[in-house]
Image: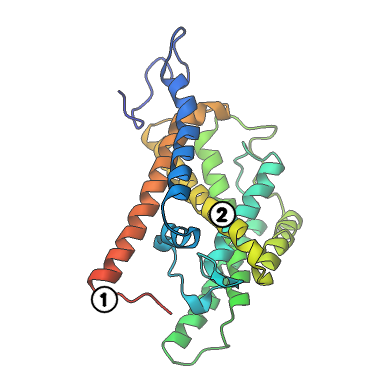
């Protein structure tokens, strides 16, 4: 059996031989089968959904209780800042998908890049202010979860835009319509993307107990999507298939490999964090 990281053959990585089952046929089932298997194991595991969600995301977030939003009696599996980052990533990715930006790979205009940079700086400043409070030294203002959420959402927009550009410029040989069109074309559209974060933010702040499950599922999906997208770029580069794809159906094998690696990476990082907490006295934050 050939490795999912094997380089393309001389006959072309995207053309399967005619007649009988082939690697392309098998790959068409690999991604949905893998996703269904992992989701099934996750939901059938004999622990509460809250504990499983927190464990799955433990490697990506400190999950500080005092920095987290609660809906009803349950805290979200990400703290406020990470809830914002992955929520912003998911909302922005959904917007780009709905706008049909699946195969564009143009660099955003300089003014958009500057705004995205300011989004990240805003989160860094708020994070530094919170860190100074933890050190019990001078800090500019009292940290608030609302600010953590807001600056996280802005950073999530920046992350989604950059990842979208990296994935598009790595995968596609040609684009859809104008291949050099950027994911976000200007400041007006960027402002629209910012406004679209409002429903997610309001739902997080609502405290409604019924919203915990859909928000937790959305954050889990966003984390897998974000990590998987970055790993997809790495898989394609390792296979030396960059700028060779012309249709989403040709991504089945590398996407399945990236999804598997995303699950493994998230589990490994979470396991390492639990191990550190248990063996060297690394106390989880409160």
Which dot marks residue 67?
Answer: none
| Element at label 2 | helix
Q: Residue at x 61, y 61 (%)?
A: 116
Residue closest to the far left:
279
Above or below 107: residue 113: below
Q: Position of residue 191 (x, y in %)?
A: 73, 60
Q: Earlier in the sequence, mark 1 or mark 2?
A: 2
Q: Compared with residue 211, is residue 69 higher up or lower down, i.e. above or below?
A: below
Residue at image coords 63%, 76%: 146
| Residue lying at 41% horizontally and 14% vertically, measured from the top left | 11
Give yes or no for contact between labels 1 and 2 (Cβ–Cβ under 8 Å). no
Residue at position x 58%, y 67% in the image: 152
- Determine whether 130 is above or below 163 in the image: below
Determine if residue 91 is in view.
yes
Measured as percent of width and height from the top left, residue 182 is found at 65, 45
Kindly indicate the quadrant of the structure image that contains residue 190.
Answer: bottom right
Mark sitting on residue 217: 2
Q: CA distance from mark 1 to mark 2?
A: 31 Å
In the drawing, does residue 234 fall left or right of residue 225?
Answer: left
Per the image, the residue denoted by label 1 is 281
- Quarter of the figure that contains the C terminus: bottom left
Which quarter of the figure is the N terminus placed in?
A: top left
């Amino acid at each position: 059996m050939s490795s999912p990281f094997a380089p393309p053959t001389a006959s072309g990585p995207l053309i399967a031989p005619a007649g009988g089952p082939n690697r392309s046929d098998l790959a068409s089932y690999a991604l949905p089968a893998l996703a269904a298997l992992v989701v099934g194991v996750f939901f059938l595991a004999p622990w509460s959904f809250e504990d499983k969600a927190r464990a799955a995301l433990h490697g990506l977030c400190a999950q500080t209780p005092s920095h987290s939003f609660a809906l009803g009696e349950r805290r979200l599996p990400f703290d406020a800042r990470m809830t914002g980052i992955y929520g912003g990533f998911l909302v922005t990715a959904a917007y780009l998908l709905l706008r049909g930006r699946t195969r564009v790979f143009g660099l955003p205009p300089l003014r958009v890049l500057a705004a995205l940079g300011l989004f990240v700086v805003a989160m860094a400043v708020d994070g530094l202010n919170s860190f100074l409070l933890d050190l019990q030294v001078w800090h500019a203002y009292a940290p608030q979860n609302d600010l953590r959420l807001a600056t996280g959402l802005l950073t999530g927009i920046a992350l989604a835009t950059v990842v979208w550009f990296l994935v598009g410029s790595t995968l596609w040989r040609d684009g859809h319509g104008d291949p050099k069109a950027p994911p976000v074309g200007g400041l007006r559209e960027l402002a629209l993307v910012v406004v679209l974060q409002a429903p997610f933010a309001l739902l997080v702040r609502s405290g409604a107990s019924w919203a915990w499950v859909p928000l937790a599922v959305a954050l889990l999906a966003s984390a897998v999507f974000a990590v998987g997208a970055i790993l997809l770029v790495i898989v394609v580069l390792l296979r030396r298939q960059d700028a060779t794809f012309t249709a989403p159906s040709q991504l089945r094998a590398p996407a399945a490999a990236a999804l598997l690696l995303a699950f493994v990476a998230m589990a490994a990082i979470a396991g390492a964090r639990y191990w550190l907490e248990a063996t060297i006295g690394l106390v989880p934050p409160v």
